[in-house]
């Protein structure tokens, strides 16, 4: 059994992908971007927003990507709670992990100031030992800093931790930090995309991920 489960937020704990894409289309309509921009943007879910905008808008005027990211936040923040419904099994999963004494944290590319109100609205905040958002670290996924900071703060060894996420960026972060990882196909990335990062396992539901956390499945030596 693992001692620490480090969860991504969007697409892993909450079914936010449809809402994220809807806001992308609102931004597209506001600026008159081509449809292909949104298609490329979807593949970057899991990367910090400013970086997403910079990647999809190469060659634009300086700092235009920041303007676009700020416009996205303006549209998104007013609807954040409604756009982040928890997956149906989340409460059960968190309760089971807590009962077994497993520490549970979040490492997300979404800002903590957005995550906290969502957790509070759904009365989930008490389940988490630590929440790290994009505004809590200097280096973002797939850099290992979010995981390494979590290990340090909770005094946990890498071999006792596992990262659970729906994107290749989550799983690459785990690899870079030297910890196990479980991909879940509940978000934007396909099973094939997740498998390409060579995670410990890939599953289709949070419940299956929980079972592996409790089992403590490790990578083959």
Image (tube, rainbow, N blue to C red):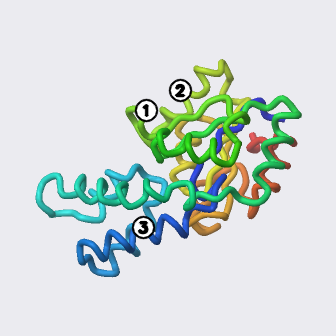
Callout 2 secondary element: helix
State left or right for residue 168 relative to residue 125. Answer: left
What residue is shown with label 1?
137
* 28 over 158 or under it: above or below: below
Number of numbered markers: 3
- Residue drawn at x 69%, y 50% is 182
* 136 over 52 or under it: above or below: above
Closer to us: 161 or 24: 24
State if disc 1 and disc 2 touch (CB < 8 Å): yes
Callout 3 secondary element: helix
First along the sequence among labels 2 and 1: 1
First along the sequence among labels 1 and 3: 3
What residue is shown with label 3?
23
Q: Is residue 209 visible?
A: yes
Query: Residue 161 in the image: x percent, y percent?
Result: 70, 33
Q: Is residue 195 visible?
A: no
- Residue 149's mark? 2
- Residue drawn at x 39%, y 68% is 24
- Residue drawn at x 88%, y 33% is 100
């Amino acid at each position: 059994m693992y001692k620490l489960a480090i969860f991504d937020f969007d697409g892993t704990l909450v079914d936010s992908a449809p809402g994220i894409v809807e806001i992308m289309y609102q931004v597209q309509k506001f600026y008159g971007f081509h449809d292909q921009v949104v298609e490329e943007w979807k593949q970057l879910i899991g990367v910090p927003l400013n970086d997403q905008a910079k990647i999809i808008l190469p060659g634009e005027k300086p700092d235009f990507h920041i303007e676009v990211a700020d416009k996205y936040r303006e549209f998104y923040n007013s609807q954040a709670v409604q756009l982040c419904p928890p997956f149906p099994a989340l409460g059960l999963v968190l309760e089971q992990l807590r009962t077994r004494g497993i520490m549970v944290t979040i490492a997300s590319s979404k800002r903590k100031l957005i995550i906290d109100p969502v957790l509070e609205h759904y009365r989930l905040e008490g389940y988490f030992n630590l929440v790290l958002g994009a505004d809590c670290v200097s280096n973002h996924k797939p850099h290992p800093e979010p995981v390494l900071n979590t290990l340090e703060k909770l005094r946990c060894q890498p071999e006792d931790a596992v990262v659970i996420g729906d994107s290749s960026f989550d799983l690459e972060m785990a690899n870079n930090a030297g910890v196990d990882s479980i991909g879940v196909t509940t978000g934007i990335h396909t099973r094939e995309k997740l498998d390409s990062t060579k995670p410990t396992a890939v599953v289709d539901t949070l419940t299956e991920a929980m079972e592996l956390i409790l089992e403590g499945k490790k990578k083959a030596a």
